[in-house]
Image (tube, coloured by chain):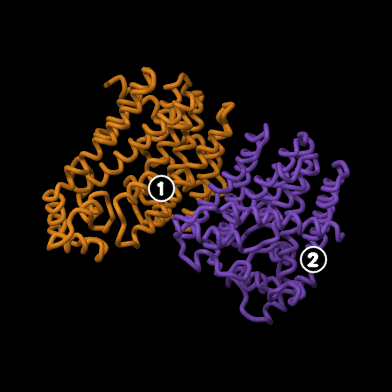
Chain colours: A orange, B purple
Amino acid sequence: MNDCYEQYINYKTQIDERLFSFIDKEKPKSLYEPLQYILSGGGKRIRPMILILSCEAFGGRFDDAIDAAIAIEILHNFTLVHDDIMDKANKRRGRDTIHKKWDTDTAILAGDELVGLAYKSLLKTKSDRIGDIAKAFTEGIIEVCEGQSFDKEFELRKDVKLSEYIMMIGKKTSMLLETCAVIGTLIGNGTEEHLSTMRMFAENIGLAFQIQDDLLDIIADEKKFGKKIGGDLREGKKTFLLLKALEVVNDGNDRDKLDSVIINKGVKTEDNIKDIKKIYENYGIIDFAQKEVECYTQKANEYLERIMESDAKGMLRWFSQMLLSRNF
Amino acid sequence: MNDCYEQYINYKTQIDERLFSFIDKEKPKSLYEPLQYILSGGGKRIRPMILILSCEAFGGRFDDAIDAAIAIEILHNFTLVHDDIMDKANKRRGRDTIHKKWDTDTAILAGDELVGLAYKSLLKTKSDRIGDIAKAFTEGIIEVCEGQSFDKEFELRKDVKLSEYIMMIGKKTSMLLETCAVIGTLIGNGTEEHLSTMRMFAENIGLAFQIQDDLLDIIADEKKFGKKIGGDLREGKKTFLLLKALEVVNDGNDRDKLDSVIINKGVKTEDNIKDIKKIYENYGIIDFAQKEVECYTQKANEYLERIMESDAKGMLRWFSQMLLSRNF
């Protein structure tokens, strides 16, 4: 466990260094200043880690995968910059977002440039399969945009189904993790079977992670969670829990309370949050969500077990456990 | 001449068809509806034409280049969608822009998706040099973003030099044309020398085209031009003409009038426009700009003449003449 953590910190340090040194231009200042700001904003570097470990799991080396790993982290930051504009989010990792610190135009352009820079880093990868690698990366971008569009559509709809939500988070959250696993496996020269196994591993990790995120908003220890619980309810977000509750609770006072979250686009008071939490508890929504997280985690592990034993596989196992227990 | 025009229409028709059929998805509707709208909005398809002809000039075929040609047109449309947000432009080719017809969030996402779709089409290209092709495409995106950032910075500055303006339009206007020429040449399997020759051809075409655009805003026949002259002056745009005039006219009443365009961020009346036009005429600014257009056009032709004679070269010669005479 400690060895894994040390290895993680070692890799993370190298990823951070490469990421900071990647932006070596200064002009135009209105473009490169916000880029340096966003890329130095921290983060767990989950995606580059999965990409590098997926490469190593099939015999590839850290150095073979690092350019693609940087690419995926830059791409992830592109999605954050543009999503923050759309979500009108003023804070990200404790700091002002780009559109808040500068303005919307600057954030649009910074995001666009991040896509270009992401491909620039990706295309430094030396591999006979560079065409397939670039295709996987591109498919990732397309699906993430689709996921974000569905998410925005769902904000306006009152009749979103749980199955639609799962489809949406598959695109918005899982897809980039799948892209990491697939590109890492391609660079490591894995087989077609390895590719689909690793893709399924990452997809299930992504689904488990997102449902757990929805769950933590309701059941987390506020101190450990680092923010007040019930934020999603305040914003009227159509989370896994709310959509499941709407499927289960068909009438009565409880149904009215759930409907009011949708109709009023969020709740206002602490008491409202407690009421909804009580409904979630009474109807087994929290248990159900926890079981779903366990189920997707279990599936992810099963896929991971299909590949041959290696240090990298051990690290992937540890890393996904850490992610899902939110222990770091 | 007529043969060339027929050939152009033939190619343009095929480009349009491929472009429309490229968006074959319907959901999420909030994403694919605006995409279909923007791609069916018309346009001369200048960039895909240059790409295809550059490929043919070195023995490649239309079919080898069409996916990359579609890619570059999609990428060009991405720049239009995001630039229109930043420029608060409500009309494009006589129709509402995406952010006007839908909203800014929709336009941001549609632009992002266009980048993904552009790479998707590009990566369908069958070539041993696909890595270099993707790198050239990526360099195009990065430079165009830099060009747009410089353009936005120049809007806020009062001391922009003509040389800076040339640098900016090199990135914002010429670079995508260079990308077309380079990718076409790569697909056609041209040599390193062919690549640099074709890049210089395209760069000079781009500069000639942009300076002529600035010139037409002042000297065009309003009926033929399709819009009122002086639009750039009304918006206070720092065009080639205005920046040159500011370099030449150092004091007196004329200088005050030029300064007022910058300070007041544009002029208001027809008389103001006539005054500035008079200054341009008196100080030889219009002659100078016309000579620069001729000079860049001449350079472009010289580069083109360096490559071996072919139907495609003849078409490129005709096409750049058409472009610069704005005869279509």
| Residue B124 x, y percent position in the rendering | 61, 41
| Image position of B229 (left or right of B235) | right
Q: Work out whether residue A266 can be spotted.
A: yes
Q: Which of the labelled discs sits on residue B191, or is there none?
A: none
B185 relative position to A199: left or right: right
Label 2 lies in what chain?
B
Left or right, residue B278 beside residue A146: right
Judged by depth in the image, the label closer to the viewer, 1 or 2, is 2
In this figure, which residue is indicated by the disc labeled 1? A80
Q: Which amino acid does label 2 sit on?
A: Asn
| A309 or A29: nearer the viewer | A309
Residue at the spot x=38%, y=18% of the render?
Answer: A308
Q: Is residue A134 toward the left or the right of residue A279 in the image?
A: right
A124 to B281, vertically: above or below: above
The Cα–Cα distance between marks 1 and 2, rounded to whole angstroms, is: 45 Å
Q: Which chain carries label 1?
A: A
Q: How crowded is mark 1: few (under 14 residues within 10 Å), some or many (20 or more)?
A: some
Say if labels 1 and 2 share a chain: no
State the SS at label 1.
Answer: helix
What residue is disc 2 on? B327
Q: Position of residue A210 (x, y in %)?
A: 30, 43
- Residue plotted at (70% across, 54% down): B14
